[in-house]
Amino acid sequence: MAGTVKHAFASGNTALGRTNSFASAFQGAYALFLLEGGPGTGKSTMIQKIADGVRDQGAHAWWFHNPLNHETLDGLWIPSAAIGVVDAAACLDAFAGFTDTKIITVSLHGAVSRDILNPHRQELQQIQEQIEERYASATDSFLHTLRIHDDWEKYYIDHIRFDAADQVTEELKSLIPDASSERPVQSTRHLYLGAATSVGAVDYVMNLTEQLDRRIFVKGRPGSGKSTMLKKLVTAGEERGQSVEVYHCGFDPNSLDMVIFPALSLAIFDSTAPHEHFPSREGDEILDMYVRTIDEGTDERYADGIAQVKDQYAASMKASLAILAEVKQLHDRLRAIYVEATDYAAVEGIGSRLCTNVLSRLK
């Protein structure tokens, strides 16, 4: 029987720049294999092959996707073996504090021909500088988009009934009991359920929640208290000894989009654009924060202003994503140079040995 796979992001292209939560995603790791090598040297392909092998052996695993190109993997986490395989370029220095973890570097540099690569050194440097400049422009554009979103939120924040919002939060807190003393030690894991990618917004909400018994789809307008409520539920869960999966917004990482309590088989998540979903089975329900917390008639009273700011937001977000598409094109140029210089037979040998090593450790 094939193992279950959870899809998520451990990093994002956000209004605060390129952020990552790899340290949280891989907390408790016994061993981490860090793949070092240039773009196009086969790191993601290697991770994918190992991930497929883990799934075929029936083990549960997390697949962490690249936030620029979600079709490729940045990392693999195997909870039962406490082993991770990660592209070192994606996680930077995230594991510097992992003193109790075996960090094993797997270098692909030896598979790259310096004779072929060296004539392209100046071009490679220029492309890398262009990538960094475009990433900075994307961050500025996303930040501008966030400021427009703040203006959108203000229409509703000014008309929220805080007592009603508190009541909703208390109702949801009642679903979170004190954890049994027999349960494992409580843990909180921070991830992203979606990302702003070069092809637009991508999310894995349905995959992350498909095995859960109860899913609460939180609807509402910006500023209707969704993220604030989720933050309070995280705190309540931690205080009551529950393990919590915290999913940050891939656009504004200071905001939360979803909270999962694995032991309770419960997910509560923001189900509005760009990750809008609807109930489809028993155990699904809608919580409408606009109806529960916002003064009646707010939409109608400020319809013209809200429509204008929504249009501004959509246009700014489209411009931001277009910059990420430019970054992707530059990355593709970088990859093409490395592809020409890479000996994939050597890469295949390294990958086969690593795959055998990882799979042999599965419980």
Image: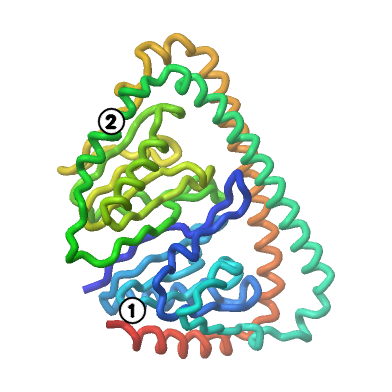
Name the residue that disc number 1 marks.
Answer: 81
- Pick out the residue farthest to the left: 282
Q: Secondary structure at mark 1?
A: loop
* Near-viewer residue (243 or 53): 243
User: In this image, 312 relative to 235: left or right?
Assistant: right
Q: Secondary structure at mark 2?
A: helix
Instruction: Compare marks 2 and 1 and give the one earlier in the sequence.
Output: 1
Residue 201 in picture, x, y percent from top left: 49, 45
Which residue type carries mark 1? Answer: Ala
Q: CA distance from mark 2 to mark 1?
A: 39 Å
Residue drawn at (47%, 75%) of the image: 85
Residue drawn at (32%, 29%) of the image: 166
- Pick out the residue farthest to the top: 301
User: In this image, 291 relative to 128: left or right?
Assistant: left
Q: Quadrant of residue 300?
A: top left
Residue 151 in picture, x, y percent from top left: 57, 25
Residue drawn at (46%, 57%) of the image: 9
Name the residue that disc number 2 marks.
Answer: 168
Mark number displayed over residue 270: none
Crowd class of label 2 (few under 14; some 14 to 19; many from 20; radius 10 Å): some
